[in-house]
Image (spheres, rainbow, N blue to C red):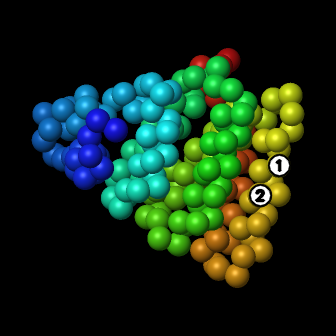
Amino acid sequence: MTQSLAELEQLCNVLYNSHNPNERQHAEGVLRPFSSNVDYIPQCKAILDSATSPYAQLFATSSLTKLLTDNSSLSSQLRLDMRNYVINFLATNSATLESFVTTAQIQLLSRITKTGWLDVDDAHREVVASVMTFLTQPSTTHYHVGLKIFNQLVTEMNQQSPGTT
C-alpha cells in the first residue's frame, strides 16, 4: 500500500466525518484508486484484516462492492473467493464490528452472490448452506447476522442490477 495503515485510517475518517469539503475532496482523491482499479482488491482485503477503524473497514467494503458492481468481467473464481472471504470475515468478526460495517459486508456478500448466481457451476448457490451455519451457532450475534444475510439476499435478488435493463 502506498500509505501506511494509520494514514489510510485517517483519510477514511476524514472521508466519512469531515465537515470541510476540501478535506473530504482531498481524501476522496487519494482513496479513489481503491474503488476504481481491480488490482486493489488484495489491498482492500488487507485493510479489512488489519484496520481497527470502522471507517476504514466501511471504505474497504464499499470499494469491493463498487469494484464488483462495475467490473462484470471478474472471473467466477475471484467472485467465489471474495464470497468465501466475506462469509469468513463475518463469521469471525461480526461480534466486534460496528453495525454499519456488518450491513455493508452483508450487502457485499449479497451482491457477489447475485452476480454469480447464473454462473455455469452452482457454487454461488451454496451460500444458503453457508449462511445456515450462522443460524446454528450458539451466539445470538451470529444468528442475527444470518437472518440479516437472508433478508438482504432476498432484497438484492429482487432489485434490478446497476447497468442492466
Judge left or right: residue 51 versus residue 135: left
Judged from the image, the secondary structure of the residue bearing numbered disc 1 is helix
Q: Residue at horizontal 50%, vertical 36%?
A: 41
Measured in 3D between alpha carbons, the distance from the residue under mark 1 to the one under mark 2, in whole angstroms, is 7 Å
- Where residue 84 appears, as percent x and y from the top left, is 68, 49
Q: Foreground residue, 113 or 153?
A: 113
The residue under the point 13% across, 33% down is 22
Q: Is residue 33 left or right of residue 135?
A: left
Above or below residue 113? Residue 162 is above
Q: Observer-nearest residue: 4 or 150?
A: 4
Q: Residue at x 46, y 65 (%)?
A: 97
Q: The residue under label 1 is which amino acid type? A: Glu
The disc placed on residue 126 is 1
Q: Quadrant of residue 94?
A: bottom right
Query: Which residue lies under the disc numbered 2?
Result: 130
Q: Are marks 1 and 2 in contact (CB under 8 Å)?
A: yes
Q: Amino acid at mark 2?
A: Ser
